[in-house]
């Protein structure tokens, strides 16, 4: 797991296309710029630029052993999980990264809810949404977050199978008033 401590690295992540590229590499595994361009609807040159930014930040690396010839360039994430703490950064850097993360979460949720698949079995009854107000201390909130992360980690690296598809799981916890 990559623990981001450098503001320049967090800024590299805090870009919508780069975040999406990381998501694609995380879910689909190593890929070439041309495939990533088709997947994201972007130009290959644009994808190549953003891959270089992510590589300079140490978030992805080339996978030369996958190339069949000198023209092919494959990229992969050495660490499938990336984590960072807002306490390690200035508020402006944290706000930008949090805002982008929230936008991505809303985008993925909206896409799911607007799709016909969201109303088809077996995924319609398997998908879930939950929220609630709890009375917690800061320590208890941190403990809850750790336990939720442990559940996600437990399911994260299961081998692919015919009945498994990528599933986005969202969990947040913060002080709020109704």
Image: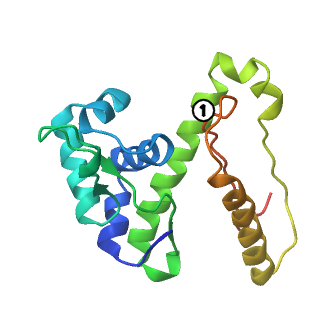
Q: Residue 142 in the image: state x and y as whole percent.
A: 72, 77
17, above or below 41, in the image: below
Side of 57 relative to 107 (left or right): left
Q: Say few, some or many: other residues with alpha carbon within 10 Å of mark 1 (under 14 / 14 to 19 / 20 or more).
A: few
Query: On the image, which quarter does residue 109 sit in?
Result: top right
Front residue of this view, candidates 113 and 163:
163
Residue for point 23% across, 64% down: 56
Q: Residue furthest left?
A: 70
Side of 113 relative to 39 (left or right): right
Q: Residue 99 in the image: state x and y as whole percent.
A: 48, 56
Residue to which mark 1 is pinned? 110
Residue for point 46% across, 65% down: 95
Residue for point 44% across, 61% down: 97
Query: On the image, which quarter does residue 152 sit in?
Result: bottom right
Q: Residue 26 in the image: state x and y as whole percent.
A: 47, 49
108, above or below 41, in the image: below
Kindly state the secondary structure of the residue where label 1 is placed.
helix
């Amino acid at each position: 797991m990559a623990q981001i401590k450098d503001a320049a690295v967090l800024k590299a992540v805090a870009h919508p296309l780069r975040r999406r590229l990381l998501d694609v590499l995380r879910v689909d595994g190593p890929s070439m710029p041309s495939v990533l361009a088709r997947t994201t609807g972007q130009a290959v040159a644009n994808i190549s630029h953003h891959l270089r930014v992510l590589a300079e930040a140490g978030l992805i690396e080339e996978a030369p052993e996958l190339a069949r010839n000198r023209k092919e360039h494959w990229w992969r994430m050495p660490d499938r999980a990336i984590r960072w703490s807002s306490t390690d950064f200035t508020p402006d850097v944290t706000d930008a990264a949090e805002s982008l993360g929230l936008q991505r979460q809303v985008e993925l949720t909206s896409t799911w809810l607007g799709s016909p698949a969201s109303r088809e079995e077996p995924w319609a009854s398997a998908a879930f949404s939950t929220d609630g107000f709890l009375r917690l201390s800061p320590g208890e909130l941190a403990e809850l977050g750790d336990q939720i992360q442990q559940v996600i980690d437990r399911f994260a690296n299961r081998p692919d199978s015919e009945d498994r598809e990528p599933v986005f799981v969202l969990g947040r916890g913060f002080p709020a008033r109704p």
